[in-house]
Amino acid sequence: VMYAGELVESGPAPLVIGQPRHPYTQGLVASQPGCGARTRKTLLPAIGGQVPGIDINIAGCLFAGRCPVVEDQCTATQNLRHPVEQADVLVRCHR
């Protein structure tokens, strides 16, 4: 999963879609239209805020300005890491 030109989550599709770790991936998964229960009049959840411009240099997480669970440490550089229980998944989020 890419956000603003940066890899934020990677792994087998069933894990990334079924158990998204990054808040952006979670927002994408939540915005998928479902079958049956939703009607066309039902609004899908939206990810608030604006995507940062490519000419803006942001320290830390590029998604921090739109993230619903942003914390102070999100302003520090976030490296891709393996969640403890999912060695084949990489995520760029300390949470």
Image (cartoon, grey):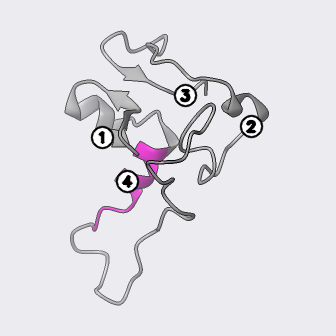
Label 4 sits on a secondary structure element that is helix
Do the residues bearing badges 2 and 4 touch, measured as CB atoms within 8 Å? no
The residue carrying mark 2 is 71
**Mark number displayed over residue 17:** 1
Among numbered discs 2 and 4, the one appearing first in the sequence: 4
Please rate how many residues cluster around mark 4, counting C-alpha atoms within 10 Å: few if below 14, some from 14 to 19, many from 20.
some
Tell me what residue is drawn at x 47 percent, y 16 percent: 83
Q: Is residue 9 above or below residue 52?
A: above
| Residue beneath disc 3 | 93
User: Does label 4 or label 1 sit earlier along the sequence?
Assistant: 1
Looking at the picture, tell me which residue is in the foreground, 39 or 58.
58
Alpha-carbon distance for marks 2 and 4?
20 Å
Say what amino acid the circle numbered 2 marks. Glu
Q: Write the residue at 74% across / 37% down.
A: 71
Residue 61 horizontal/vertical position (percent)? 57, 35
Q: Earlier in the sequence, mark 3 or mark 2?
A: 2
Three-letter code for the amino acid on which mark 1 is drawn? Ile
Q: Which residue is label 4 attached to? A: 28
Which mark is on residue 30?
Answer: none
Q: Nearer the viewer, mark 2 or mark 1?
A: 2
Left or right, 51 with respect to 1, comes to right
Q: Nearer the viewer, mark 4 or mark 1?
A: 4
- Residue type, mark 3 in image: Cys
Disc 2 element: loop
Q: For the residue marked with disc 4, what is the amino acid?
A: Leu
- Quadrant of residue 62 within the rendered picture: top right
Closer to us: 8 or 39: 8
Coordinates of residue 86 in the picture (x, y in percent): 38, 15
Say which label, 4 or 3, has the lower sequence index: 4
Q: Residue 32 lies in magenta, yes or no?
A: yes
Counting residues from the start of the chain, the first of labels 2 and 1 encountered is 1
Residue at 28%, 68% in the rendered image: 33
